[in-house]
Image (cartoon, helix red, strand yellow):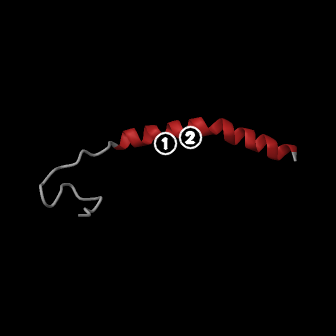
Amino acid sequence: MEVDASADACPICGYEAPRQRTSLQIAAWVMVLLLLWPAFEGLMYLVELL
C-alpha cells in the first residue's frame, strides 16, 4: 500500500516514521557543495584556458 510522503503515521497500523531533521539535511548539502567546489574550480580554470 502506498502512503503519502507527508503523512505523519501509517493509516493502517499507526506507526510514526521518524523524520530526518532539517538541520541534518542542510549539513549534508553543505558537505556536498564543499566536496564539489574543487571540481567546479578546475572546470572553470579549463574553460579560461580555451
Mark 2: few/some/many CA within 10 Å (<14, 14-19, 20+): few
Relative image position of residue 31 (x, y in whole percent): 51, 36
In the picture, measured across the screen, residue 1 lies left or right of residue 12, that is right
Coordinates of residue 36 in the picture (x, y in percent): 61, 39
At x 50%, y 39%, the residue is 30
The residue under the point 57% across, 36% down is 34
Q: Which numbered tag is attached to residue 33? A: 2
Residue 13 position in % (x across, y down): 12, 55
Name the image quarter holding residue 41. Answer: top right
Rendered residue at 25%/62% (across/down): 3
The answer to whether 1 appears left or right of 48 in the picture is: left
Quadrant for the N terminus in the image? bottom left
Q: Which mark is residue 17?
A: none
Residue at 28% over, 59% down: 6
Q: How many marks?
A: 2
Task: Please give left or right for residue 39 compared with residue 10 in the image.
Answer: right
**Mark 2 residue element:** helix
Q: Residue furthest front?
A: 1
Q: Position of residue 9 (x, y in %)?
A: 18, 55
Q: Is residue 13 above or below residue 47?
A: below
Q: Residue furthest right?
A: 50
Q: Amino acid at mark 2?
A: Leu
Is 7 above or below relative to 18?
below
Q: 4 or 29, which is in the foreground? A: 4
Among the 4 quarters of the image, the one containing residue 44: top right
Q: 10 Å neighbourhood of mark 1: few (<14), some, or many (≥20)?
A: few
**Mark-to-mark CA distance, 1 and 2:** 6 Å
Q: Type of residue at label 1?
A: Trp
Q: Identify the residue under disc 1.
A: 29
Q: Are marks 1 and 2 in contact (CB under 8 Å)?
A: yes
Secondary structure, mark 1, is helix
The answer to whether residue 30 is left or right of residue 20 is right
